[in-house]
Image: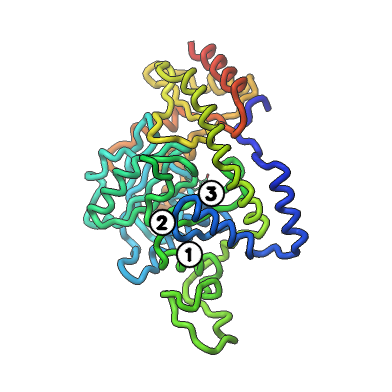
Amino acid sequence: MFYELAASTWGQEEIDAIQRVVESNRFTMGDHVKEMERRFAGYFGIRHAVMVNSGSSANLAAVAALFFKKSNPLKRGDEVIVPAISWSTTYHPLQQYGLKLRFVDVELDSLNLDTSRLEEALTPNTKMILAVSILGNPAALDVMRAFADRHGLYFFEDNCESMDAELGGRKTGTFGDINTFSFFFSHHISTMEGGMVITDDEELCHLVRSLRAHGWTRDLPPDSPLFEARSDDFFEAYRFILPGYNLRPLEMSGAVGLEQLKKLPSFTAQRRKNLALFHKLFQGDDRFIIQRENGKSSCFCFPIILNPKRDPDRKRVMAALKEADIGYRIITGGNFLRHDVIKYYDYTTVGPMTNADTAHDYGFFVGNHPFDLTPQIETLHSVLNQVCR
Ligand SMILES: Cc1ncc(COP(=O)(O)O)c(C=O)c1O
């Protein structure tokens, strides 16, 4: 395809890393995963990192962990403020744990939660804000963090779409009490499938470690605050303390993740160069609404909303992109409230979801890969210029 929606970022280093795992003959979670956790925590300046087998699993383990905290745990029926646009598995763990979602519309230009609606979203039952920085563009994490602190709420960052983005000199994915990342194929770094939970809170870290592996104690130090170690190692080896899962990553993912993490700064730098060209061509053009950068974006794609005021023919535009061999898709999952699965959710909304609907109906994105995309972006511009006359 001339302009792929997603492109591989693996080189020989990743293949060699897999080969080293094959030669070691240890495939299940081990030293490579541990080292990936150590380096990842170091990169983000956070005390604890726990690797899992996907960003979705990271969200599941993180929500679950908040339910098993000793003090002030989440409880069924508690309310969580969420943005109307995100990926399905941002929301599913909340539903699975019996939380009530309170949807807030997004800003049309940033595509992130409209923080001017936070006061209205707050109720006596609110216990958490779930922040998502959409497609590499930091949400108003500083505003949400301050709001959460003011009202004694947990702040959860699903940062699966914005690794290496920055707001006020601080990396996204470090503002939350607990923060999650995805290493899926098309994301900032890729282990094909993989994810991470990071937190400065030791108890949350230990909870996620136990929940990741069957709810047992094996991956916890003997002085963990979660349990009191006993002397009979026969029974201690298979001691279950939490209703957990098996979300463990493979050693191959840990080894590839280490190689990809080394490349992350250069990936981000190249994506920002591509973004500069995209801005140059599209910014200020009334036909297209593009993402207003908040802080420093690490975008791995370029969302575009056809300005509804100009009554665009979306189908015609998509057909022109197809004809030009340019890959495109809906923005993240669009307005989540418009999916059939919503019938299983307990939720309320804060007013109409006007902007999320506009992004759903008139928006799409194309890829931004860590190599020079000048010909692709120029062609994209000329195709859209032509079809949106
Ligand atoms: C915001 C968000 N959260 C969670 C996920 C899930 O990550 P994964 O695909 O690694 O399960 C995604 C996936 O793209 C996402 O965009």
Quadrant of residue 38 in the image?
A: bottom right
Q: How far, Cα to Cα, is label 2 from label 1?
A: 10 Å
Counting other residues with Cα less than 10 Å from the Cα at mark 2, is it few (<14), some (14-19), or many (20 or more)?
A: many
246 on left or right of 135: right
Which badge, 3 or 1, comes first in the chain's sequence? 3
Q: Is residue 269 visible?
A: yes
Q: Nearer the viewer, residue 148 or 119?
A: 148
Label 3 CB sits under 8 Å from any ligand 1 atom: yes
Q: Is residue 317 above or below residue 271?
A: above
Tag 2 secondary structure: strand
Question: Can you identify the residue that label 3 sits on?
Answer: 182
Residue 208 numbered mark, or none: 1
Instruction: Please tell me which residue is depicted at 56% across the width and 61% down the height of the picture.
Output: 247
Which badge, 2 or 1, comes first in the chain's sequence? 2
Q: Amino acid at mark 1?
A: Val
Instruction: Please tell me which residue is depicted at 37% across the width and 18% down the height of the picture.
Output: 309
Specify the farthest residue to the bottom. Answer: 232
Horizontal and vertical percent for residue 361?
A: 44, 29
Q: How far, Cα to Cα, is label 3 from label 2?
A: 14 Å
Horizontal and vertical percent for residue 201?
A: 39, 63
175 on left or right of 27: left
Tag 1 secondary structure: helix
Q: Is residue 350 above or below residue 357?
A: below
